[in-house]
Image (cartoon, rainbow, N blue to C red):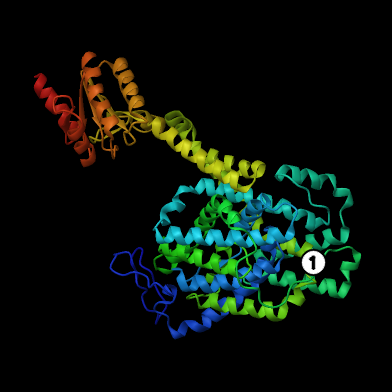
Amino acid sequence: MSGPGKVVRPAGEAPQPSSSRGTRTTPLLFGSLRGYQRGWLRSDLIAGLTVWAVLVPESLAYATIAGVSPVVGLYAAAPSLVLYTVFGSSRHLVVGPMSATAALSAGVVALYAPGDPAVFTALTTAVALVTGVLCLVAGIARLGFIASFISEPVLKGFIVGMALVIIIGQVPAFLGVEKGEGNFFEKAWAILAQLGTTSLPTAALGVVTLAALLAIRRWAPKVPGSLVAVAVGIVAILVLSLDDEGVAIVGPIDAGLPALGLPDVSWGDYTSLLGPCAGVMLVGFAEALGAAKAYAAREGYDIDPNRELIGMGAANLGSGLASGMVVNGSLSKTAVNGGAGAKSQVSGLTAAVLTVLTLLFLTPVFESLPEATLAAVVIAAVIELVDVRSLRRLYGLQTPTMRRLYGNAARHDFYAAAATTLGVLVFDTLPGLVIGVLLSLFLLLSRASRPHVALLARTTDGRWVDAERRAALGADGGTSIPGVLVVRVESGLFFANADTVRSRVRDMVADGRPHLVVLDTETVPFVDVDAAGMLATLRTDLARQGATLVLARNVGQVRDELRSAVAADERPEIYPDVESAIAAHRGAEG
């Protein structure tokens, strides 16, 4: 029987090396294949075939999101799968074109190449190269922690906004109408204005394809719905001649392998792309790391964030040198890979080989692919990302009790997510992400600058609890001790909140007029020089009001900072707990 947290492995499967103790590191090359067993080969080959069935149509579709020829998605997929296997640390992550980074790429390139398809394609490849270089530099510099700068609510809001932008961008091809320009709302208005010109055969094909994809996803999730939809769409064109009825098709696709080398852009273009590509890197890495960690935790091995950056960098460099587009780890395709039984990146190598064979022999088949079918594949892939339920959950975190105790702080995460979504819809992808990150940092500072200062009371079992919170929850609010005020600051103390805490404590003393104030610092993990000085000043302030300030249950950092920053005769006395502080002063008074 397995204990809590223990990973149960199939019979015959060797335990995977772990770097959690710091005694072993992932090999520099092919670390994801370490400890490979011959018995895994069949599962990996089947998983690779399954991933290929999803990868090909989605790569074609995501290339259209990036604003380039569908075949560019295949150019990107093959080298990125191989190079990630060489340098990455995840055994399950599938790397390739993805909707969010494809849309970001399109938004970035549109700033530099409006109306010129050749320059647009070259700059799209340059985005992959610059993103790859940035990932490599960040990985070598061990900056894997940078993903933490995008909070989960901001990333959720960004993805919701991106999904809506992608969907509205595919609707014209889905209905057979002209594509509008501008932000999400301007494009939506342009579509509404053209509904009278909808191509009925195109719309019928799109609706049927989308309905079939959603039905397969729900009732037959193991079936590669995207590949089925693409095959049916191509057959419909060839058998029913729907292109003669006005249904647009993808058209000529260059067969064979891509040209290798740098795109035809200037060095000035590369330097101009550095800032925007940093945003592309941050989004792609955050999504990839989340997917990699999810499957590593499930299978019982470790992920090295810095190796993931290097793997993403190599994948993007390979894609860029092969005339491809920006790539990153895919949560959806990784789920397909894991669900199909993948044990290692041999599945990714299998998908890469099959993608190369597709480029060599199957591209003529995809020339008859209806654009409406491709649009339906994209919409079906991203529609589940419009996660309104998560936004509602964030909004509902603020209960009436939490609002009364903490104000709007409990809803800050929702505000960050909603602002990011709206920013993406109104201002485009990268500005929307920047808005979300900046607002998230602002709300964090706002919350930190106004920490909750709780008035404590003693319960019948001797615990000191937040009296107001306990009363709001209908529990025993405890009792206070005459002449004694016990307070707790639920935050670190630093320059941004020191004056707020000082004012709040002074107000509480003015209301209660105690002779002893005990500041319980159990929930104060740190203080800075400003806060240490504030405590000395507060001690003097309260002395003028006839009260003595003492500290209880402080952590080592608080004690050390007070000793180094405040003279001995100016700092408050420190006691091991609240009861000791009260007893000592009662004894002194007696």
x, y percent for residue 259: 65, 73
In the rendered image, the vertical position of residue 313 relative to residue 360, given as above or below: above
Name the kind of residue labelled 1 in the image: Pro
Whether residue 253 sits left or right of residue 432 in the image: it is right
Within the image, what quadrant is residue 515 found in? top left
Whether residue 580 sits left or right of residue 456 in the image: it is left
Whether residue 19 sits left or right of residue 79 in the image: it is left
Secondary structure at badge 1 equals loop
- Judging by the rendered image, the residue that carries numbered circle 1 is 370
Q: State whether residue 214 appears in this view.
A: no
Q: State whether residue 444 appears in this view.
A: yes
| Viewer-side residue, 393 vs 422 | 422
Q: Residue at x 22, y 19 (%)?
A: 540
In the rendered image, the vertical position of residue 155 relative to residue 18, given as above or below: above
Q: Residue at x 36, y 63 (%)?
A: 5
Q: Residues within 10 Å of mark 1 (few under 14, many from 20)?
A: many
x, y percent for residue 403: 47, 31
Within the image, what quadrant is residue 284 found in? bottom right
In the rendered image, the vertical position of residue 212 relative to residue 466, given as above or below: below
Within the image, what quadrant is residue 328 found in? bottom right
